Image (cartoon, rainbow, N blue to C red):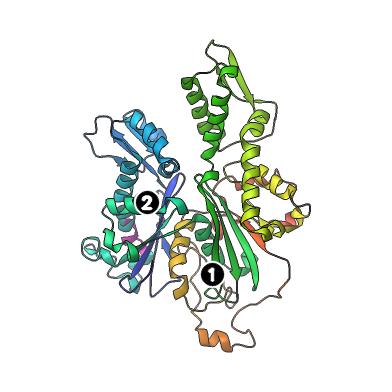
Amino acid sequence: MTSLNRIEYIVGIDLGAGTSEASIAHVNDPLNIISVSAWDDSMRPSETFFSSILYSKDGSDAPIYGMQRDDAGDIGVYVNNIRQYIVDVDASDEKLGQLMDGLTVRKVVTDYLRYFVVFALKRLQVHKKLVKNEHFQEFVNEEFIDEDIKTIGYCLVCPADRQEYMKDCFIEAGIIEEFEAEYRLSFVIEAVAIAHSQLSRDRNETGIQENQDYFVLDVGDISIGVAKIHAASTISLSTITEISDDATFGLKNLDNKFKEYLIKNMTELNLNISLINRFVRTFSEFIEYGFHMYIPTGTAMSQDDIDGNPIEFTYEDLDRIVFKPFIESIAASIIKADKSYVQCKKFSTEKYGINEYFIKNLLARDEGGLKYHRSIIGCPLGMVSWGAVSSILNTYKSQTPFSLYNEHRSSFSDRGLSLPEIVSKESTDDNDGNDAYDFTLKLSIGPIAFWTDTVGIDALFHKLPIPSVLLKKFTDTDF
């Protein structure tokens, strides 16, 4: 985004692996970022909105958005985890076309964006924190979306090599016009968004120290991203840099790796394309996001060959064929991207059930790696879209210290205490005594790496032989 002169609000959008998020801030109040926390008005409102579309079989009825798979039944064509389809657009077009004539990735993404963005804005309009905020009085007006929506700038969380494609979908959805894209639409990779949200948290909780470098690694479903934080004395003086972002290493590529193996060995395995596709579908739905090695020789999946004879793959087989090479390639890619990453302190998580193996392989490349293991970042709902907003407004923030009067500063204004009073740049620069905020002793401990997660954090603590003193668990309650 080259200019914010015509923009009053920044909205962060994340079409996550399973659910979508939206957050907002006013440019004159950049520290007060608010995320959608209720997607309906029921007594127990849903905190999640599923990234899905249900098309009627004959196309006569309007699509249904945000539905869970279990509720979809067989009443139509159900498309979920929408962003997975942008990994390989040609292959996805073929797959979607088999489900329904004329169904393409561009149509699915455009339809979803057209609905979700407007729906998210409407949910933000009734958010109690916006209704009470003086900066949002125009925004919460019911005519705002029709009359003043052009004062909104958007930041979409998206892998680097898919951003041009998503920009076209954004424009085609009618959210912005093509000539507005330069100043109304920007992009950020997920690792950078998470880095921004982490940097804004209480330093006493994160362990971030002044004049230190930290890494954020995001092992996502469609890409692997690495971002680097250089922490200064204030949020605004700190810098976050995108180190790498690679869509060839996303978890959805595990499907392709497994399929490649089956095709290469289809004669020996006595399989045809139909049976291979069934194997891959089973792998995608039941193995990919919950892989483990509790019983290495146990049967992970079984299916009959052309002649009706069973073919079995053990967990050990799948580790050798798919997971181990995948994890090794990620480790090599990260180290190649930044040599200093090898000697990082590492904040790690179990994401989608495979990070146990990723961590072990990465640490195996550095004998002293375990001593650098630091902590865990959880990813509560709203965190990524929150970080997207912060990534745009960061340069507009006052020189706010990490910790002020020892008061907790929550990244998520919905879930924490009030933000502290803003400290001006002048008062920060003149405060030789550090009375206004807490600075801790700088330690030369080398760069530190964060590893991001959305699910399954608890399991990691029972599997990895990591001293508890090196771990700090971050949960939803931290936000």
Q: Secondary structure at mark 2?
A: helix
Magenta stretch holds residue 126: yes
Quadrant containing the N terminus is bottom left
Residue designated by label 1: 409
| Eye-nearest disc, 2 or 1 | 2
Q: Is residue 180 visible?
A: yes
Instruction: Choose between 89 and 195: the one closer to the eye.
Output: 89
What's the residue at 65%, 66% (across, down)? 207
Q: Is residue 372 left or right of residue 381?
A: right
Which residue shows up at 52% across the image and 39% down it? 253
- Using the rendered image of the protein, determine whether residue 459 is visible from the camera's viewpoint: no
The picture places residue 257, in percent across and down from the top left corner, at 56, 34
Q: Nearer the viewer, residue 287 or 246?
A: 246
Q: Which picture quadrant has residue 201?
A: bottom right
Label 1 CA crowd tier, 10 Å (few <14, some 14–19, many 20+): many
Compute the Cα span from label 2 to label 1: 33 Å
Estimate the x, y position of residue 474 in percent, counting from the top left: 60, 56
68 in magenta: no
Asked if residue 404 lies left or right of residue 273, the reply is right
Residue that label 2 marks? 166
Which picture quadrant has residue 34?
A: bottom left
Q: Is residue 194 left or right of residue 173?
A: right
**Relative depth, front residue between 75 and 285:** 285
Judging from the image, what secondary structure is the residue with disc 1 in?
A: loop
Q: Residue 307 appears at what percent x and percent y?
A: 54, 10
Residue drawn at 50 percent across, 68 percent down: 417
Q: Which residue range is magenta in the image?
A: 123-128
Amino acid type shown at disc 1: Arg
Amino acid residing under circle 2: Met
Q: Provide the major secondary structure of the magenta segment.
A: helix
